Amino acid sequence: MRRSVRRAVTGIVATASAATVPLAGAMPGSAATPVTTGLSRSAAAQPQSAVATAALPLGCQPLASALMPTGQLTEVITVNEHPLRPPYWEDIYRSIAPAGTVTALTSTSTQWDRVNYPPVYLYSRQFFVRSGALYFGSTTYNTVKQTKSFTSRQVGSSWSPFRHLADSSDPWTGYKKAGSLYGVNSNTGTLHRYRVSEQTWGKPVLTHTGSKTGFGGIRSLTLAYQYRPWASDGQDALLATTSKGALLLITMPRTGSFAPRTTVLRSSTWYFDDLAVTNCGSGWALLAVKKGVQQAHLYYIPAYNGSNTRFTYVGRIGTTWSASRTAGFWSDAEVPLRQWNP
């Protein structure tokens, strides 16, 4: 498997609700007329090739995990210098589940084994809802023998209403997951938080630590950045789109009572079904997918600043994006991060 190298980033997060601002460089078919406010270059004002040339290099290698209609789980790898070329799709495993039975998928996280030096095994892991139950899947890749094996363990039941998941648990300490899993119950419009503890490898335990109503319109959800102990704000943050095309930043402290705060980054035109975020130099790369038309679009975010957050539209990736579900992809050193307030 190819690996990417990314660096931790800084950024400003506005925590109050923001005023309505139309999306600069709105995608074809969006509800609003594209404008150029907040962009270094407007996707609507130039040919796509000109936008891509102006934006390159990104300073990162945008990645995603994708579940194919066949049930095959893949790592999607773009090229730093040419991120809009058709990406490289590398199998993580060929049969995570029969087509159509996975209804929610978190980002895939990866880590090397700590037994061998140099490491021999690479592990790819993710939570997903399959046939109404929550599972934790792990793929073991033997880099010497070039073989892969997949195992899954049920870690929860009655999860069929949860159609959107975001994972901020990673193996930062001891290469075992610790942190939070967030999920939206689409029936009740409730955002839930679960503490993840993995004392035994491959056997995470979830403990419910809070919920908040008011999220019934969520269309897509992903991890924007993750809490780190040295971060002065001490927060996890999620990015979400809504059925009405709004783009939201949801921030919440990892400790204490569950009190998510929503910031409206854009009030319309963000009609995307899946989102994936990658650290990218001094900012973030955002991959946004429209499943109905099989398109994936790439944006660059230098910092979060409420309705004044700048989104540079890089362009459409490849020709078609046929994955049934798209999520983030990161390792313990590459999780979407924000280290400090400037």
Image: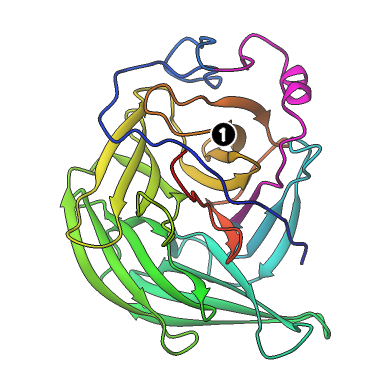
Query: Position of 43 compared to 120: left or right?
Result: left
Q: Quadrant of residue 75?
A: bottom right
Amino acid under disc 1: Val
Q: Is residue 268 above or below residue 107?
A: above
* Residue at disc 1, secondary structure: loop
Q: Nearer the viewer, residue 252 or 68?
A: 252
Residue visible at 20% across and 57% down? 258
How are the colours assigned in the image?
Answer: rainbow
Mark 1 surroundings within 10 Å by alpha-carbon count, few (fewer than 14), some (14 through 19), many (20 or more):
few
Where does the image place residue 101, in percent across and percent down from the top left?
45, 65
Question: Can residue 44 be found in the magenta stretch?
Answer: yes
Numbered range of the magenta stretch = 39-65
Where does the image place residue 220, in percent across and percent down from the top left?
40, 44
Where does the image place residue 302, in percent across and percent down from the top left?
56, 32
Q: Nearer the viewer, residue 134 or 302?
A: 302
Residue visible at 30% across and 64% down? 160
Where does the image place residue 187, in percent across and percent down from the top left?
21, 52
- Image quadrant holding the N terminus, namely bottom right
Q: Is residue 278 above or below residue 106?
A: above
Q: Which residue is mark 1?
A: 293
